Image (cartoon, grey):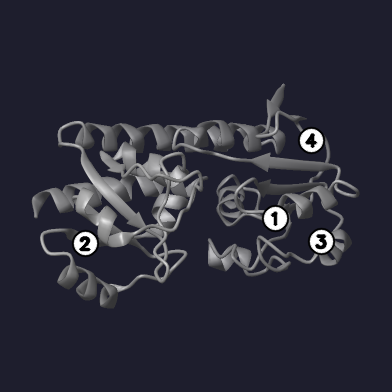
Amino acid sequence: MQWSDALGKLHTRYPGTPRIVSLVPSLTELLVDLGLAELLVGRTGFCIHPRQVVRRVPKLGGTKGFDIDKLRVLQPTHVLVNIDENRREEVEALSDFVPHLIVTHPLAARDNLELYRMLGGIFGREKEAEALCADFEHAWAALGALANGLPRQRVLYLIWREPWLSVARDTYISRMLAAAGWDTLPLASLVRYPEIDLPELVREAEIVFLSSEPYPFRARHLHPLTEHLPGIRVALIDGEMVSWYGSRAIQGLAYLRELRASLAER
């Protein structure tokens, strides 16, 4: 059997014992949940979940600017990357010595099903992959049952301040929110994470979400916004639960269900 990655490259079941480097935090977590922790030989410094497992895996730097010489020494059979999170030129440099580069690019929640099955198939963890798929479908159905009974709402999702940055509708984040019945505002920009005019856009939103990542919004950031945005609900949101794909998406769907129900009651 073959599986196609985000660039259309076909991959097959690896016959030997793989040596895997993950340069994507959410994929590192997914590999562990597929039962592949012992085969991980390298990760980024941002690959922090599950902490007690990944702490033994050597760090290679960031998702961008990783140490290619350290990576080469590890002699990986497979390196996992993502179109959004890794630089193209750095990934292309790996093709000189890495036998198998697996490129990912999930753009919607349900893309995770294909991701589970691809990695589960390549690394011989089909049973674990199908278990994750079943858990995902359960969480997806539960969120849909709640969201379908509530009116859709327009939201502004903020990921940075000074300058204010938001997310376009063609992002994974936006589509995760849409699954909960929250539609991000259409932005007049070709950039996927554009700088915005907050006072102008906020008038169109029913809820403003302050994400915990990449900017670490905290409770102290709520008051200045609520003071200057009368009548607009401002709430904190766990960015990992909305932006991390892989196995974290299952928890993310459950988290969004709880948050949607909580805000609907207020």
Which residue shows up at 35% across the image and 35% down it?
Answer: 140
- Tell me if residue 205 can be seen: no
**Is 109 situated left or right of 39 in this image?**
left
Q: Is mark 1 on a helix, strand or loop?
A: helix
Residue 71: mark: 3
Residue 264: which numbered mark, if any?
A: none
Mark in the foreground, 1 or 3: 3
Residue 234: image tag: 2
**Type of amino acid at the residue the image marks with label 1:** Glu
Q: Nearer the viewer, residue 246 or 40?
A: 246
Amino acid type assigned to the residue bearing label 3 in the image: Leu
Residue at the farthest bottom position: 220
- Measure how far apart labels 2 and 4 are at the Cα level: 48 Å
User: Measuring 71% from the left and 35% from the top, which residue is drawn there?
Assistant: 122
> Can you identify the residue that label 4 sits on?
14
Q: Quadrant of residue 101 in the image?
A: top right
Q: Name the secondary structure under disc 2.
A: strand
Image quarter hosting the C terminus: bottom left
Residue at the spot of label 1: 38
Mark 4: give few (<14), some (14-19) or many (20+) Cα within 10 Å: some
Precedes in sequence: disc 4 or disc 3: 4
- Secondary structure, mark 3, is helix
Q: Position of residue 180 (x, y in %)?
A: 28, 40
Is 9 drawn above or below residue 230 in the view shown?
above
In the image, residue 68 lies at what x, y percent? 82, 62
Residue count near mark 1 (Cα–Cα under 10 Å), binned few <14, some 14–19, many ≥20 = some
Q: In the rendered structure, are the residues bearing label 1 and label 3 in contact, judged by CB atoms less than 8 Å apart?
A: no
